[in-house]
């Protein structure tokens, strides 16, 4: 087939236009592919930035929680310290009371002895007075306490009882 020059020119021009359009479409595809890659990279970076932001937000919340916990712990320690001081004061008070009771108990035998001696002396005196008023030959004479024991008993205890036991 023989073509005329004009037809060949037209065909050539048509082929050039097609090639140009093809190269333009190819460039667009390359541009689109590069854009897609850039878009994928950008979205990947965005995801990693959001993930990092979540991590930082969690860490900030953790720091706030730790701060609150530290504040609560400080309040508890302060309250515990106050209670410890109160307990120490109460223990000192109890210790003083125990010492007072111990001193009272150690003085108790001497006090009981003095009181019993004084009551015994008073009872002997009353019996002697009764025997002096009504002498009876069948009742033996009671043993009288020594004057030093009688004086000692009356000096040690002012609380004497005059009962006829």
Image: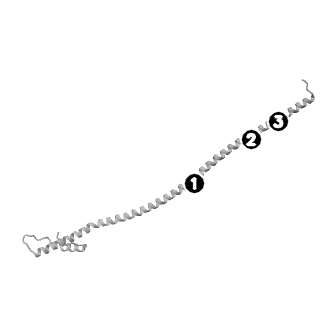
Q: Nearer the viewer, residue 157 or 146?
A: 157
Query: How far apart are the two marked residues, 2 and 3, measured between alpha carbons?
Result: 20 Å
The image quarter containing residue 94 is bottom left
Indicate which label's residue lies in the foreground, 2 or 1. Answer: 2
Residue 30, image x, y percentages: 77, 38
Q: Nearer the viewer, residue 91 or 150?
A: 91
- Label 1 element class: helix
Asked whether disc 2 touches disc 3, contact meaning CB atoms under 8 Å apart, the reply is no
Q: Which mark is residue 35?
A: 2
Query: How far apart are the two marked residues, 2 and 1, measured between alpha carbons?
Result: 42 Å
Residue 110, image x, y percentages: 26, 68
Q: Is residue 23 left or right of residue 58?
A: right
- Label 3 element class: helix
Q: Which residue is mark 3?
A: 21
Residue 57, image x, y percentages: 61, 50
Q: Please tell me which residue is depicted at 27% across the width and 67% down the height of the picture.
A: 108
Asked whether disc 3 touches disc 1, contact meaning CB atoms under 8 Å apart, the reply is no
- Label 2 element class: helix
Q: Please tell me which residue is depicted at 78% across the width and 38% down the height of the picture.
A: 28
Q: Which residue is mark 1?
A: 64
């Amino acid at each position: 087939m023989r073509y005329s020059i004009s037809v060949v020119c037209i065909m050539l021009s048509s082929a050039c236009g097609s090639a140009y359009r093809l190269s333009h479409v190819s460039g667009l595809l390359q541009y689109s592919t590069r854009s897609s890659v850039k878009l994928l990279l950008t979205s990947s970076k965005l995801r990693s930035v959001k993930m990092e932001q979540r991590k930082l937000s969690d860490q900030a919340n953790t720091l706030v929680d730790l701060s609150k916990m530290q504040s609560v712990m400080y309040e508890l320690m302060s309250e515990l310290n106050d209670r410890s001081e109160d307990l120490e004061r109460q223990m000192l008070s109890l210790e003083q009371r125990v010492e007072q009771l111990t001193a009272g108990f150690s003085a108790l035998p001497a006090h009981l002895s003095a009181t019993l001696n004084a009551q015994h002396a008073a009872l002997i005196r009353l019996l002697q007075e009764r025997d002096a008023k009504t002498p009876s030959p069948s009742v033996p004479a009671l043993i009288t306490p020594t004057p030093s024991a009688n004086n000692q008993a009356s000096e040690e205890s002012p609380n004497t009882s005059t009962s006829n036991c």
